[in-house]
Image: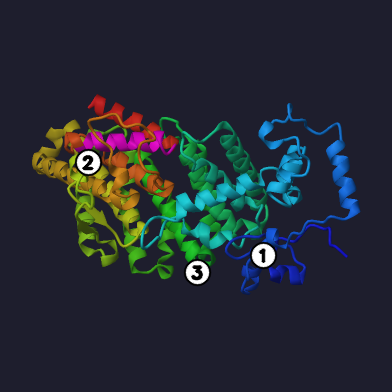
Amino acid sequence: MVYRGRLGKGCAECRAKKTRCDAARPSCGQCKRAGRQCSGYRDLDALRVVDQTSLVSQKSSRKTNSPTRATSSGTPLGSGYVGSSSSSPANSKSSQEDLLEKIVPGVRSFTSPHFWALQEASFLLFDQFISVASTCPKTELDFVALLYGDVPSHGMLASMVSALGFMALPSHQRAQSHQMFAREQYVSAVRETQKALQDPNRATSDETLATVLLLGLYEFVDAEEPQFNTSSRLSMHLEGSIKLLQLRGDAGMDHMSGTRMFHRICSQVVLGCMHRRLRIPEALLSFADSMHKHLHAEEMMALEVVKIAAQLCGILASTTVVEPSEAVDHFNTLLSLEHQLAAWEQRTSFRYHCRREPLRNSESAKRIPLRHQDTYFSHIAASCVNRYRSVRIVVNEEMIRLFEMVPTLITAAGVEGNRQCQVASITIAKMSEEIAYSLPFFFGEETCHLNVSEQDGIDSKPRAGMHAATVTLMPIYFSATQRVSPEMYRWLMRYLNWIGQSLGIGRANALRRERQLLEDLG
């Protein structure tokens, strides 16, 4: 007897055990959780047979003769899909639903009308945010790949993966429907996260913390407000992630995904607080002090930069309005921080060292203000070194600012202010150029061909990873000052513009406008 039911799309193991298979690739979630080998999925088209029984013929005849079916003049798919012959399936009169069933067998079994769009969005996230073009693809967002296969396919983390996938589309391809889908998934993730926070077990899970971090990343990509605001959703998500760290305690740091998420929080908080002149939350610093036993030597080096940045942010927060009586003490503290940062660079392990290589394209030297490129052990190492450079730039910029405001007091205190400011300017230029030389490693050499003398179209450059843009955006902002050469400054500013306009990262547009305003004001 002919089987007329719908063919199962699950793997052989799930079909044998009669369990629901999520059809994830390369291995389904059920098999991954059970620790068994997933044999993959069968080709349904190869198994499908054409049933020519009388019952099927009658059903087909009724469909063909039904007055409710589309005619050749009214089908929204055009006359090319309907012909005079009824013998060919491609030319038969069918509704859009039947045609979709023929193109994608079994599509009616999916409850969500946007199933395939969400699937493509998740693929795009892994392609643009996690899978980087490097021989050592270690990124700050590795924890998503580590957790994604073990969480519900319709849970809060999966929703944020889809939301960011839609936002990973280039700006010129990101239609209103994509933004609508992304917002729907974002709202769904927020609601699920709020529910999870009411459950003590779910609140401390890796999925909850990972979702909160991706919520913050979504705000970073989507927002175009002029400044980071303490009441903004981005700040709220970062503060929430710190509270979750405290709630999780040591138990959340005994595996790789936990330490990855911890370092991600540290990097975002450091860069954000320096930009907004805010103190780094004491809760994060206290938690970091208790994490030494969970970190290896290279991770401890990265944590040293966080602690130096915390001292810097304390000064930045207290010198928004400078008190002359405190300016000398702040200047001396900044000078001490500069010495600590210089010593940190001398003590770094080989994993943080860069290797200087010539540009591979002979035309590159003519088109970009770089004479070489730097390569690193991994994206994580390169990101950490660029954060160090950003901290050092801000330390020296603040030293110059304080001296220019109260030069007499600082000189009277026995500090060689003029000489220190000259050294600070040289240091800023050096750190800024080193950030620029790291960009080919993140984006690829071809993507760096932003001509500083011509107006490049936003779609004229190769597609680069969103991960590269998100981790280099703040370092580029800090390095784009008039202390570098005019050619380098214009190139860095064009890079900010390109990240915002071509890649569609809203924060880049806001940062470019802010940097332009600061430079115009001198």
The three-letter amino acid code for the residue at tag 2 is Ile
Viewer-nearest residue: 145 or 484: 145
In the displayed structure image, the side of residue 342 where residue 254 appears, left or right: right
- Label 1 crowd bin: few (<14), some (14–19), many (20+), radius 10 Å: few
For numbered disc 2, what is the local secondary structure? loop
Marked residue nearer the N-terminal end (1 or 2): 1
Viewer-nearest residue: 342 or 519: 519
Which residue is the site of mark 1?
42
The three-letter amino acid code for the residue at tag 1 is Arg
For numbered disc 1, what is the local secondary structure? loop
Image quarter (top left, top right, bottom left or bottom right) of the C terminus: top left
Farthest top residue in view: 521
Residue 254 rendering spot, x and y as whole percentages:
50, 69
Marked residue nearer the N-terminal end (3 or 1): 1
Q: Is residue 269 a member of the stretch shown in magenta?
A: no
Q: Kindly report which numbered mark, 1 or 2, lies closer to the viewer in this rendering.
A: 1
Which residue is the site of mark 2?
368
Depicted 487 relative to depicted 254: above or below: above
Q: Is residue 493 a member of the stretch shown in magenta?
A: yes
Q: Main secondary structure of the magenta part?
A: helix
In magenta, the rendered stretch is 488-504
The three-letter amino acid code for the residue at tag 3 is Asp
Q: Is residue 46 visible?
A: yes
Residue 244 rendering spot, x and y as whole percentages:
54, 54
Viewer-nearest residue: 232 or 98: 98
Which residue is the site of mark 3?
254
Residue 195 rendering spot, x and y as whole percentages:
67, 49
Picture disc at residue 194 = none
Contact? badges 3 and 1 (CB < 8 Å): no
Marked residue nearer the N-terminal end (3 or 2): 3
For numbered disc 3, what is the local secondary structure? loop
